[in-house]
Image (tube, rainbow, N blue to C red):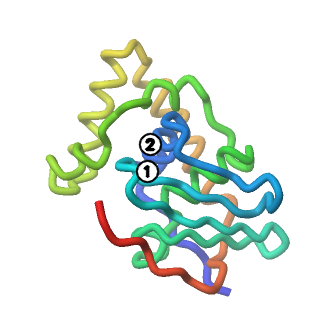
């Protein structure tokens, strides 16, 4: 079974933001499935998690094309508390226009990260504490050693 690649840290920011904007729905009937809406709310990503095989599927672009754990899957694992996170930071990211910021910086994750950190500082968030929390989440993702759950579903098209 193929192992998921480790995502760029910015995907953790995006996961916190998806939680903050309440764009994640977990099926309470099928506790291992969820849907995460895009920032525009015009498309959604499907997440399926199989705890018995430690495998997860999400049809966001990063998960589908680059094989890393995309932000919808990270958000899903956070909401299930498989990955612990500080709700203060997710709330601080509420309303950030992520897609627009990424497009402004032509998907330069470093520039996007710097911009978002400036937004958080302006909201009174301690930058160093936030970055330490991101590092802890990143370490937890690497420790999970998640596999790719088949079968893959193509990503949605649109904005």
At x 30% / y 38%, what residue is drawn?
97
At x 54% / y 55%, what residue is drawn?
36
Q: Which of 75 and 82 is in front in this view?
A: 75
Q: Which of 57 and 141 is in front in this view?
A: 57
Name the mark nearer the viewer: 1 or 2: 2
Which of the labelled discs sits on residue 13, or is there none? 2
Residue 42: horizontal and vertical position, in percent? Answer: 38, 56
Q: Give the quarter of the image for residue 144.
A: bottom right
Q: Nearer the viewer, residue 129 or 21?
A: 21
Which quadrant is the N terminus positioned in? Answer: bottom right
On the rendered structure, is 113 left or right of 1? left
Which quadrant is the C terminus positioned in? Answer: bottom left
Which of the labelled discs sits on residue 9, or is there none? 1
Residue 34: horizontal and vertical position, in percent? Answer: 65, 59
Give neighbour class at mark 2: few <14, some 14-19, many 20+ (Cα, 10 Å): many
Residue 152: horizontal and vertical position, in percent? Answer: 56, 83
Q: In the displayed structure, would residue 31 be above or below residue 110?
A: below
At x 60% / y 28%, what residue is drawn?
87
Contact flag, marks 1 and 2 (Cβ < 8 Å): yes
User: From mark 1 to mark 2, how far is it between C-alphas?
Assistant: 7 Å
Q: In the displayed structure, would residue 31 be above or below residue 97?
A: below
């Amino acid at each position: 079974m193929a192992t998921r690649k480790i995502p760029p840290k910015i995907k953790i920011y995006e996961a916190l933001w998806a939680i903050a904007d309440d764009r994640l729905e977990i099926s309470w009937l099928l506790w291992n499935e969820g849907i995460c809406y895009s920032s525009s709310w015009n498309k959604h990503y499907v997440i399926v998690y199989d705890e018995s095989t430690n495998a997860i599927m999400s049809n966001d672009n990063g998960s589908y094309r680059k094989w890393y754990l995309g932000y919808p899957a990270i958000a899903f694992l956070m909401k299930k508390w498989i990955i612990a996170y500080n709700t203060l930071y997710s709330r601080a990211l509420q309303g950030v226009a992520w897609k627009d910021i990424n497009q402004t910086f032509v998907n330069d994750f470093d520039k996007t990260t710097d911009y978002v950190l400036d937004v958080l500082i302006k909201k009174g968030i301690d930058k160093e504490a936030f970055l330490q929390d991101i590092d802890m989440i990143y370490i937890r993702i690497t420790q999970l050693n998640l596999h790719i759950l088949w079968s893959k579903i193509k990503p949605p098209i649109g904005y």
